[in-house]
Structure formats: C-alpha cells, structure tokens
Image (tube, rainbow, N blue to C red):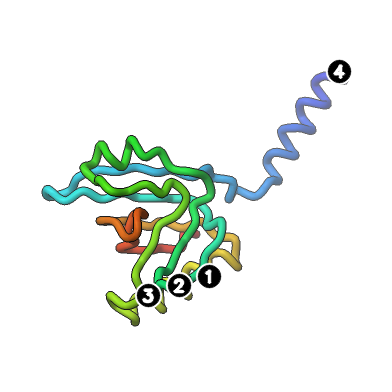
C-alpha cells in the first residue's frame, strides 16, 4: 500500500509542475531551395556588443553537423545566433527588445536563421511562445 501511495503522490506532484519545461529543439531544412535553421527553446542570455551584433544565446549548444547538412559553411558558433544592427536598425532594436522580453518573462522562443554573421547563424525571424 505504501508503494501505491508514493506512486500516486508522484503523479499528483508531476501534474502540478509548470508545463513550460519543454526541451530545446534545433533543426535545419531547405524550403524553396533556401536553407534555414530553426531553434525553439529558452533564451539563456542576450546582449549587443560594440561591433553592433545583437546576440541571443541558446539554452544548450547546437550540433554544427545539422547546420552544415543544410548547406551552411562558415558557421563555427554553437552557442548563439546574431543579427548585425547596422543592416536594419529598426528590426535589430525590435529584435533585441523582444529577446529581452522573452528572457525577463522566462518564455520559450522560436527563431529562424538564414545565413551567417560573424561565424554565427543570422537571425531572420523571432517569436515568443506561449
């Protein structure tokens, strides 16, 4: 009877845990002849450096073999994605603000990346997940 009670207690405790414990996913594919990569997970940290790069760090390292299989070369960073502020300042500022919002709210994000910037995948699109 003790084993059944403990089992039921564990089931109840697991049911009360937050459902936001989704592990990160990282995939790359080709759509209409254009390769892209997608990350879903939490933002570990974010910053903008004096080279005008907005950086968003992944929750865990990504597998570069997935990136190269999609056709990207020159990507060596497994820890973050980037966007060059000077390419489109309005997008870069909105992107950085959205990244900080997701980080502060501890929300999961989805980002798509096309191309590379400074050895990192280049952020192209960004969503905050529910």
Q: Is residue 112 visible?
A: no
Residue that badge 1 annotates:
100
Residue 68 shown left or right of residue 12 in the figure: left
Nearest to the eye among marks 2 and 4: give it.
Answer: 2
Q: Tell me the CA gap for discs 3 and 4.
A: 59 Å
Of mark 2 and mark 4, the one earlier in the sequence is: 4
Q: Which mark is residue 39?
A: none
Q: Of 113 and 8, which appears nearest the observer?
A: 113
For marks 3 and 1 on the same chain, the one whose residue lies earlier in the sequence = 3
Label total for image: 4
Q: Position of residue 49 (x, y in %)?
A: 47, 71
Marks 1 and 4, the one that precedes in the sequence: 4
In this view, the residue farthest toward the bottom is 90
Residue sitting farthest toward the front: 51
Element carrying mark 1: helix
Residue ID at (80%, 21%): 4
| 96 to the left or right of 36 | right
Q: Residue at x 45, y 64 (%)?
A: 55
* Residues under numbered marks 2 and 4 in contact, where contact means CB atoms less than 8 Å apart: no
Q: Position of residue 22 (x, y in %)?
A: 54, 45
Residue 98 position (above or below residue 26): below
Asked if the residue at tag 2 contacts the one at tag 3, i.e. Cβ–Cβ closer than 8 Å, the answer is: yes
């Amino acid at each position: 009877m003790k084993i059944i009670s403990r089992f039921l207690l564990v089931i109840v405790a697991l049911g009360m845990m937050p459902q936001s414990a989704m592990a990160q996913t990282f995939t790359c594919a080709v759509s209409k002849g254009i390769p892209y990569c997608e990350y879903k997970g939490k933002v570990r940290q974010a910053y903008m450096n004096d080279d005008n790069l907005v950086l968003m760090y992944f929750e865990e390292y990504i597998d570069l073999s997935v990136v190269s299989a999609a056709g990207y070369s020159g990507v060596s960073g497994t820890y973050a994605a980037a966007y060059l502020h000077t390419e489109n300042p309005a997008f870069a500022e909105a992107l950085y603000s959205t990244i900080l919002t997701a980080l502060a709210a501890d929300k999961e994000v989805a980002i798509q990346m096309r191309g590379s910037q400074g050895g990192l995948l280049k952020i192209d699109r960004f969503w905050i997940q529910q």
